[in-house]
Image (cartoon, rainbow, N blue to C red):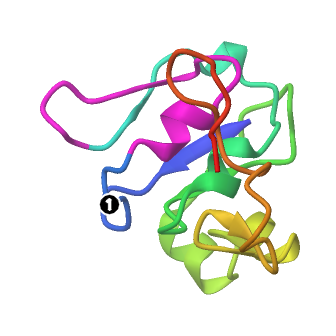
Amino acid sequence: MIELVSADRCIRCDACVDACPDDVLDRSPSGGVPAIARIEDCQSCFLCELYCPADAIYVSPFKDARESVDEAALVARGLLGSYRRALGWKGIKASGADSDLSHRLPEADGTPWER
């Protein structure tokens, strides 16, 4: 389950908010760091971590239990952004996907991105 959105690393792009299929995160009304608003709805899908271009999110692999986390320890262990790196994503797209747009999120109204 999502355990951390780093205020120091977050670039306030809201990609994580858009990526979450369970509406766990809320945009900050003042343009700040997204808030973990409905943690009980988190399914540990890792999409928020995957789409974060700043490696500002940590999702624990434990879906049904909270984990006490220390940001400095997560950074030291290389865990922030580790899921994205393990899948070969650079920025918010898969490595080698320059001509394939299927990995991108749909528009806010649900329509797919067009080439």
* Res. 91 image quadrant: bottom right
Verify whether residue 26 appears in magenta: yes
From what the image shows, is residue 76 above or below residue 21?
below
- Return the x and y of residue 67 as percentages of the image width and height: 71, 43
x%, y% of residue 37?
47, 19
* Residue bearing the label numbered 1: 11
Q: Which residue lies at the image location 82% right of the left edge and 37% below the top edge?
A: 45
Amino acid type at image mark 1: Ile
Does residue 30 show up magenta in the picture? yes
Which of the image's four quarters has the N terminus? top right
Residue 4 shown left or right of residue 80 in the figure = left
Label 1 crowd (10 A; few <14 / some 14-19 / many >=20): some
Residue placed at 72% from the left, 74% from the top?
A: 98
Residue drawn 53% across the image and 48% down it: 4
Element at label 1: loop
Q: Nearer the viewer, residue 90 or 41?
A: 90
Extreme residue in the left direction: 30
**Picture coordinates of residue 71 (x, y %)?**
50, 65
Q: Is residue 102 left or right of residue 19?
A: right
Q: Position of residue 110 (x, y in %)?
A: 62, 18
Is 86 in front, or is 79? 86
Please report the bounds of the magenta region as a residue range. Answer: 14-32
Predominant secondary structure in magenta?
loop
